[in-house]
Amino acid sequence: MGISADRISGAFFFLLGLALYFFVIPTYVETVEGSNLAPKTVPNYISIIIAICGAFLVLKPTEHQTQSLRAFLVTGAYAAILAIGIFAMSLFGFEYVAPVMAFVIMWMIGERRPLWFGAGTILMPLIIWFLVTYPLGRALP
């Protein structure tokens, strides 16, 4: 059981999932009375999934080779678009930014089918807005 990039990143995500579950989510997610679903439910599930996937990666790393510099730059571009989109949401709101951000990301990954563009840029943000606003009883920025 040698040390590889997969094992190191798996250990990172295992520890990140545990830190989110035990420290970050209890500290920064407020409890709300009268809601159908507690605000910390979904983040807790996601943090558990992150920790489990990290543990699996430590136990059984892949045989993949290191990616090219171009792949890392494209990944950085995706991360930058997400960061800019999140910042723009704080200024303009989810309803205006999410469709544009979805369109840009779908265009970058090579999606060109009109039906998928419509579903990804209009339908999915609408579903996310509806689920967060009504069943969860929370407001989006």
Image: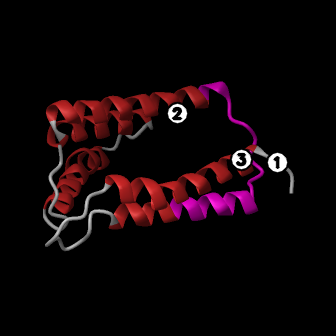
Residue shown at 18% from the left, 48% from the top: 140
Residue 21 or residue 138, whichever sits in front: 21
**Which type of secondary structure does the marked residue at label 2 adopt?**
helix
Q: Residues within 10 Å of mark 1 (few under 14, many from 20)?
A: few
Q: Are marks 1 and 3 in contact (CB under 8 Å)?
A: yes
Q: Is residue 121 above or below residue 107?
A: below
Where disc 1 sits, the SS reads loop
Question: Whole-Å distance between the Cαs marked 1 and 2?
Answer: 24 Å
Q: Amino acid at mark 2?
A: Thr
**Disc on res. 75:** 2
* Quadrant into which the C terminus falls: top left
Identify the magenta region.
49-70
What residue did someone put label 3 on?
Answer: 8
Tag 3 or tag 1, which sits nearer the N-term?
A: 1
C-beta proximity under 8 Å, tags 2 and 3: no
Question: Does residue 16 sit above or below 91 in this rendering?
Answer: below
As measured in the structure, the alpha-carbon distance from the residue carrying label 2 to the one carrying label 3 is 19 Å
Q: Identify the residue at horizontal 16%, vertical 38% (top origin).
A: 93
Q: Is 11 positioned to the left or the right of 114 in the image? A: right
Question: x, y (%) of residue 70?
Answer: 60, 26
Mark on residue 94? none
Residue 113 position, x and y percent, is 33, 44
